[in-house]
Amino acid sequence: MTPEQVGFPHASQAAQLDRHIGKHQPETVWLLTSREPERLNAAQWLRANRQYWGVEGLHQRLDASTNEDSCRVRNRNAIWVLGMFRRLAASLFVEWCARNPRRHRATMTDFHAAMDAEQTRAGLRFVTARTPSFMARS
């Protein structure tokens, strides 16, 4: 289908993508790009679309666990520092889940609880270690 047929005359390519994800209802989405087919073929386009949604997965995790979208901090340095700490927490959470297969349905709240008051010493040891590990010291 041409972009003009879809109603986007300034796009070089348009594609219809039918998604069937798990138990969700199938959905149809349109992809538009200004790149010519010689510069972006169908396989490259699909890969780029999947990579975009991979980034959205991190964004969803950050927003759901830290309310990042509703943060009203406006100082440039504070935004940068908060963003780094949020991403650090998300990375630590992913590592924590990967260390134990029973945690595959764990949430950031579970992670925070595990690192809370009783685990403060272990948490500090983890984030300050040269080679971090969730395994207990022997």
Image (cartoon, rainbow, N blue to C red):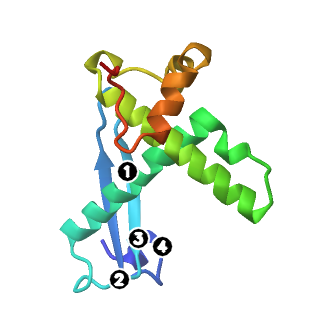
Label 4: element kind = loop
- Quarter assignment of residue 130: top left
Query: What's the residue type where badge 4 is placed?
Result: Gly
Residue 124 in the image, given as x and y percentages of width and height: 53, 32
Circle 3 sits on which residue? Answer: 32
Which label's residue is closer to the chain start, 4 or 2?
A: 4
Alpha-carbon distance for marks 3 and 2? 9 Å
Camera-nearest label, 3 or 2: 2
Circle 2 sits on which residue? Answer: 35
Q: In the shown orientation, is residue 35 left or right of residue 122?
A: left
Work out which quarter of the rendered image holds the C terminus and state it: top left
Alpha-carbon distance for marks 4 and 2? 17 Å
Q: Residue at x 42, y 40 (%)?
A: 129
Query: What's the residue type where badge 2 is placed?
Result: Arg
Q: Residue at x 67, y 47 (%)?
A: 69
Q: Residue at x 66, y 50 (%)?
A: 82
Residue 80 in the image, given as x and y percentages of width and height: 65, 59
Label 1: element kind = helix
Q: Nearer the viewer, residue 33 or 58?
A: 58
